[in-house]
Amino acid sequence: MSSNKIVVAIDGSEHSYLIVDKAMEHAKLFSVSILLVFCHRRFPTIMGHPYRDEEISNIISESEKVIKPFLQHIRNAGIAVEERIMEEPAGAAITDIARIEKCELIVMGSRGLTNLAGLIIGSVTNRVLHTAPCSVLVVR
C-alpha cells in the first residue's frame, strides 16, 4: 500500500460493526492503521446566530457519540485509528479523504436494496465506486 492507512466509512448502524471488523482484518493483515470516517448531516444555513451555533454543536456532539464505540472497538483490538467527522455529501468526502491521505483501500457498506431503491438510497456506495482513487471493498 502507498500509505499506512485504510479508509473505513461508517454510518453508525449495526452493519457498521461488520464493516469495521472486516477493515480490522485487513489492517492486521497489512499492518496499517484505520482512518475512520463518519459523515453527518449538513449544518443549517438559514438559522440565526445563537441557534445556528447551538445546532452545529449538537450535530458535532451527536457525531462524536456515534463514532466513539467504533473507535474504542478498534483501539481494543490494538489497531491505530484516526477519525474524520465530515459534513455530507458522504460520497465526495470519502473519496477526497482517500485521495488526500493517499490510501489504497476504502472499506464501506452496501445496504443491498432492490435495484429501484438502490438507485436512490445506495448512491453513496455507487458514487465512491465510480470516483474512488483506490480500491474499494464493499461489505454486505
Image (tube, rainbow, N blue to C red):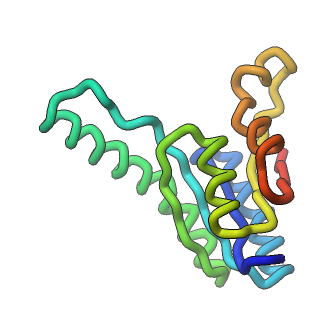
Q: Residue furthest top?
A: 116
| Residue 113 drawn above or below residue 89 | above
Q: Residue at x 55, y 67 (%)?
A: 71
On the image, the x and y values in percent for residue 120 come to: 71, 20
The one nearer the camera, 68 or 101, is: 101
For the point 82% across and 71% down, the residue is 26
Would you identify the image quadrant in which residue 33 lies?
bottom right
Q: Between residues 102 and 28, which one lies in front from this camera angle?
A: 102
Residue 50: % across, % down? 13, 38
Outermost residue, left side: 50
Which residue shows up at 82% across the image and 59% down it?
134
Considering only vertical position in the picture, is 137 above or below 40? below
Residue closest to the eye, 15 or 101: 101
**In the depicted view, which residue is nearer to us: 5 or 92?**
92
Left or right for 65, reference 55: right
Residue at image x 77%, y 45%?
A: 131
Quadrant (top left, top right, bottom left, bottom right) of the C terminus: top right
**Would you identify the image quadrant in which residue 8 lies?**
bottom right
